[in-house]
């Protein structure tokens, strides 16, 4: 089947304009400046109300994360469950299979 060369033109044009359309509603747009971007706050569409944002700020102030973020300090990791004792970790290491031991050694040595 012969496909006319000009028939693919709309698809090429669409493929070239999709990235530009995706950036139209973002806060930052690429630019040829020293910063590499321009900021457009009017393009930002928030789904949260002012009250919700203020409640999040107050919660961050109470738990100390706001002070860390203001200093650009890393945020502490949230615990996902109870920790293990030293004895539990040692027992796991002693009972691991050779494949698990090899995988752990590769992780620790980087290769």
Image (cartoon, rainbow, N blue to C red):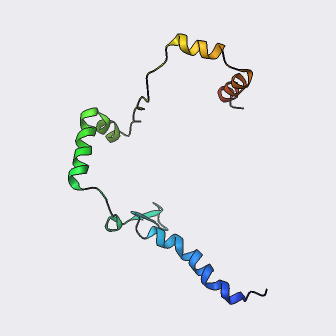
Q: Measuring 22% from the left and 48% from the top, which residue is drawn there?
A: 54
Q: Residue at x 32, y 36 (%)?
A: 65
Q: Quadrant of residue 24?
A: bottom left
Task: Using the rendered view, name the quadrant where residue 38 is placed.
Answer: bottom left
Task: State the residue in front, 83 or 20.
Answer: 83
**Looking at this view, is 2 or 54 the one in front?**
2
Out of 57 and 41, give the one closest to the viewer. 57
- Give the image location of residue 29, x and y in percent: 44, 66
Placement of the N terminus among the 4 image quadrants:
bottom right
Q: Is residue 34 above or below residue 58?
A: below
Q: What percent of the width, then of the height, locates residue 39?
A: 38, 64
Q: Quadrant of the C terminus?
A: top right
Residue 11 in the image: above or below residue 72? below
Does 17 sit left or right of 48 as displayed? right
Residue 110: image location, x then y, percent: 68, 31
Can you tell which quarter of the image residue 105 is in? top right
């Amino acid at each position: 089947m012969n496909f006319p060369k000009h028939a693919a033109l709309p698809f090429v044009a669409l493929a070239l304009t999709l990235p530009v359309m995706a950036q139209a509603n973002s806060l930052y747009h690429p630019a040829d400046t020293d910063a590499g971007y321009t900021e457009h706050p009017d393009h930002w569409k928030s789904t949260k109300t002012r009250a919700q944002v203020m409640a999040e700020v107050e919660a961050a102030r109470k738990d100390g994360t706001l002070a860390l973020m203001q200093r650009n300090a890393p945020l502490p990791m949230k615990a996902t469950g109870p920790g293990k004792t030293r004895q539990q970790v040692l027992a796991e290491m002693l009972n691991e299979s050779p494949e698990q031991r090899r995988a752990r050694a590769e992780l620790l040595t980087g290769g």
